[in-house]
Every structure is written in structure tokens, then in C-alpha cells.
């Protein structure tokens, strides 16, 4: 297993990767669903899918439950305390969320993932890599280098202790684009779940950096690198 990969050759929409799994007639658990963008895509594709979506941020959770999706149950809860029976879930997804778990609870969360998975079930954990231009921007106000290292080490140790199998590890780019700096700011700065308090001075520095990557009309396009660890019970 590798923390980083400099020689990435594949660019995907992550939902395309997810849909290579057979998720029809399955119980699917998403941990750390955030604004539920992937939740909605998984729930609305295919057929006979039951999706349970956990989120720890109460403000975002209240927004999610207003979506009223027939086959989605939103739950205010963390990955370290999954309130489901043993071997009750076919597939688990974590999109950019594992590193948000406190370091001291990461192993507990993995044990919970393993507990609720059915035999042969898969856990898909995607994590952004601490590299690339977009990462340079976000690290100016929300530096996640250490927590991403901690997340990788927790997963690696869990696998090396034979508590779960590594089915596959893959690296890919996903495209991201912004109409202007205001669009970037709205999507990444001063969000309820990261508690950033950005001064006007720092915001000016971030904007200057953003403009160095942008086009003349202030639009910007990035290739954001990810690692996916697919674990199998």
C-alpha cells in the first residue's frame, strides 16, 4: 500500500467507479456523507437499493433529511459507533471522510466497518492525496497533511494485521472546476464541518494564489488526485 502516487494515468468521475460494483438488491452504508451528493447518485441509479447515510455534522444532517429520498435513511452518527447489526451491510462507502475521524477512533471505526459488513462484502474508502494545485490552495486554510497520513496508516495497519483483506488499491484523478473565486470560496471556505475562520488578509492571499491557476475569466480547472482502498471482509 502507498500513501501517494506521482505517476497517475487515469481520470475518472468517481461515480463511474462506484457503479462498476453490483449495488442492486443491496444494503449500502455511506459513512460521512457530507452534503449527500454521492448518496443521491447511488440511491437514484439502478434498482432495489437501500442506502443508509451517516453524518456527524448536525447542521449538514438537518439539511440532508429535508431531501426526503424514499430509499435513503439519514442518520446523525459517526463511523466509530455504527448502529447496525453484525453482518447486515453489503457495501460500505467513505468518500473523502475517513481522515475526518479523530486519530484515536480510526481503528475503532475500521472494526465497526468490518463488524457490520457481510462476509465477502466490500468497503470502498477514497481519500484525496496531499498533492496537486487544488490541494495547494486548500492547504492555505485547511492543512490536512497529517490527518491524511494518520488515515492511511490506520488502514494499512488494519490490513497488515489481517483484520480485513485489501481487495484493490487504485489511484486516479477527478476533474474539478470553478466559475470564479467566489465559486471556489463557496464550496471550500468557512464550511460548517471544518470550522475554518479565514481572515480577510488570508482570503486575499488565497485569491491571489487561485488567480495564478485560473484563466482570464477567473474560471479554473484542476485534476484532483485520489487513492481508493477497497477492502473485503
Image (cartoon, rainbow, N blue to C red):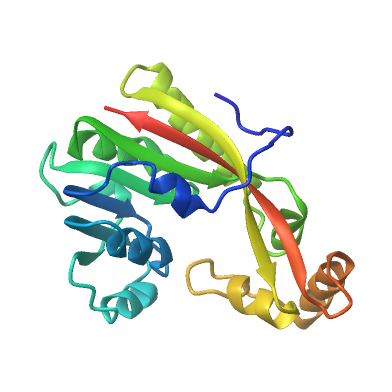
217 vs 37: above or below: below
**Is residue 67 in view?**
yes
**Quadrant of the image occupied by residue 53:** bottom left
**Residue at 28% over, 42% down:** 22
**Is residue 140 in view?**
no
**Quadrant of the image occupied by residue 124:** top left
Across and down, in percent, residue 121 comes to: 24, 33
**Count of numbered marks:** 0
**Residue at 27% over, 56% down:** 46
Of the 4 image quadrants, the one containing the N terminus is top right
> Foreground residue, 197 or 38?
38
74 vs 88: above or below: below
Q: Please indicate whether residue 209 sits to the left or right of residue 88 in the image.
A: right
**Quadrant of the image occupied by residue 206:** bottom right
**Residue at 50% over, 51% down:** 14
Q: Please indicate whether residue 201 sits to the left or right of residue 104 in the image.
A: right
Q: Please indicate whether residue 168 sits to the left or right of residue 8 in the image.
A: left
> Foreground residue, 14 or 129?
14
Across and down, in percent, residue 168 comes to: 45, 27
Amino acid at each position: 500500500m502507498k500513501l501517494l502516487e506521482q505517476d497517475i494515468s487515469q481520470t475518472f468521475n468517481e461515480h463511474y467507479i462506484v457503479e462498476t460494483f453490483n449495488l442492486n438488491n443491496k444494503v449500502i452504508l455511506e459513512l460521512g456523507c457530507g452534503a449527500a451528493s454521492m448518496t443521491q447518485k447511488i440511491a437514484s441509479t439502478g434498482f432495489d437499493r437501500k442506502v443508509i447515510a451517516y453524518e456527524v455534522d448536525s447542521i449538514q444532517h438537518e439539511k440532508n433529511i429535508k431531501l426526503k429520498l424514499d430509499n435513503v435513511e439519514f442518520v446523525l452518527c459517526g463511523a466509530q459507533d455504527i448502529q447496525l447489526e453484525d453482518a447486515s451491510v453489503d457495501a460500505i462507502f467513505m468518500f473523502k471522510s475517513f481522515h475526518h475521524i479523530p486519530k484515536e477512533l480510526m481503528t475503532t471505526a475500521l472494526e465497526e466497518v468490518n463488524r457490520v459488513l457481510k462476509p465477502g462484502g466490500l468497503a470502498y474508502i477514497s481519500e484525496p492525496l496531499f498533492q496537486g494545485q487544488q490541494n495547494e490552495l486548500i492547504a492555505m486554510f485547511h492543512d490536512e497533511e497529517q490527518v491524511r497520513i494518520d488515515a492511511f496508516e490506520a488502514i494499512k495497519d488494519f490490513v497488515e494485521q489481517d483484520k480485513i483483506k485489501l481487495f484493490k488499491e487504485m489511484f486516479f484523478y477527478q476533474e474539478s472546476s470553478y466559475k470564479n473565486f467566489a465559486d471556489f470560496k463557496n464550496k471550500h471556505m468557512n464550511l460548517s464541518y471544518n470550522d475554518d475562520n479565514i481572515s480577510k488578509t488570508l482570503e486575499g492571499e488565497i485569491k491571489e494564489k487561485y488567480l495564478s491557476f485560473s484563466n482570464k475569466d477567473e474560471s479554473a480547472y484542476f485534476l484532483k488526485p485520489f487513492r481508493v482502498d477497497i477492502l473485503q471482509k
